[in-house]
Image: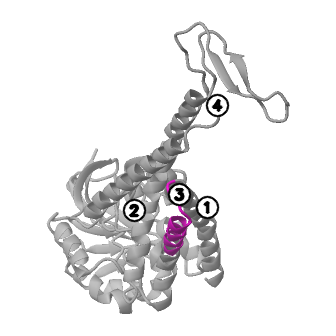
Amino acid sequence: MVLQALMFFSMVLIVVGPIHWYLYKRLVKDTTTTKRGRRIGAVAIIALAAALLAAFIVPRAIGAKASWVIPLIGYMWLAVLFYLLVTLLVLEIPRVIANRTWARRAAAPTPVAADSVVATVPAATGTGSGGSQTLLAEPGTEPAQGGPADPSRRLLIARGAAIFAGLTATGITAYGVKTALGDPVLKRVQIPLAKLPRSMDGYKIALVSDIHLGPLTGVEHSRRIVRSINGMNADLIAVAGDMVDGSVAELGDEAAPLAELRARDGAYFVTGNHEYFSGAEEWLVEVERLGMRPLQNERLDIRGLTLAGVNDVSGGSLGEGGPDFGKALDGRDPGKPVVLLAHQPIQAFEAAKHGVDLQLSGHTHGGQMVPFNLIAALQQPVISGLGEVDGTQVYVTNGAGFWGPPVRVGAPPDITLVELRAM
């Protein structure tokens, strides 16, 4: 665990360092003409980088709730930093074009009306002739000014880009905060299953994932989610992992409202990667105490379908028990459709080998902050909504909470009512 933490910290440093150097260059060095201003800017950039690193480290050291101020500063800077970086990179091309255009204009000869221009200049010293020399310029031109573009124009471009990037990043982040802290969007999707009996046509599963109770949430976050789910009147509730970012001792009070979840056929839970960072064993006990049934590589028959659940892949790497599809699915009734709860969409590749009809997942947050969805797509086969992996249908919810920055852009939090339809 310590080795993994050190590796993660090293990777963060490798990424964070160059990004902050780039931001310093574009936002401070290129826009400031005094040494004092550059020193102040450098100190501010270093302090924000330190706050970002502390947001990852301090909660694990002193507890999630005791350290909420540090994560708030660090994670908010992470969101602003991300959109500053994206905006500035987009502006690189027009910035280069503008600087080169002005440089060419400054170096180009300027046409004049006369056929020629006679210029009298002082004679060069050391010639011994004294007086002046007469030079004849080419017809239609005046002597070229040459040299680079006016430094004041470069400064104007740099400051304009910095102001635009700052306003853009701040505006997007503010919008993202409002979205992340608002009510989850209630979605509804109909998914046909070939083996589903007619008697279960219209069976409703309320799917929620990535609640992420932690240092920047509160008990109202849980209550809001419970109200939304109970209002769906679902037959079954599926909680697909990443419920918490902290220990039971720290977050037990925030999780308490989840005991009020109500569905005819009960509520079920599978682990996500964050449970293994937060004490999975104690949370599995607490989840059961709250009235949810953990599915740890196991299955059960509910009316005319088989509901199964597997552990998250992180459990295996952390030595706490990873997914076991064989244990969960071998020997089942082949005449019943299988609905599998698995935190990560990538687990669908293995699920498909075991003939799973539908996998319900979370983990991706829908990307959480566009264009992170493009990066997430490099790892996961489905980022948001309904997709298919090797013949197995996969539905991925954006999740009801957030991780890291309390910011969501282009991927609002959601809870989905999955309605199964007989074919």
Closer to the observer: label 4 or label 2? 4
Is 77 on the left or on the right of 415, as rendered? right
Q: Earlier in the sequence, mark 4 or mark 2?
A: 4
Return the mark for residue 362. 2
x 34%, y 47%: residue: 194
Inter-mark Cα distance, 1 to 3: 23 Å
- Position in image of residue 131 (x %, y %): 74, 27
Q: Position of residue 47 (x, y in %)?
A: 50, 75
Q: Residue 39's mark?
A: none
Residue named by callout 4 = 146
Left or right: residue 98 versus residue 419 is right
Q: Which residue is mark 1?
A: 18
- First to last magenta residue range: 31-47
Which image quarter is the N terminus in? bottom right
Determine if residue 295 is in view. Answer: no
Q: Which residue is mark 3?
A: 33
- Does the magenta portion include 227? no
Look at discs 1 and 2 and give the one toward the viewer: 1
Q: Earlier in the sequence, mark 4 or mark 1?
A: 1
Gap in angstroms between the C-alphas marked 3 and 2 = 49 Å
Q: Amino acid at mark 4?
A: Gly
Place residue 291 in its image quadrant.
bottom left
Residue at the farthest top position: 115
Q: CA distance from mark 4 to mark 1?
A: 35 Å
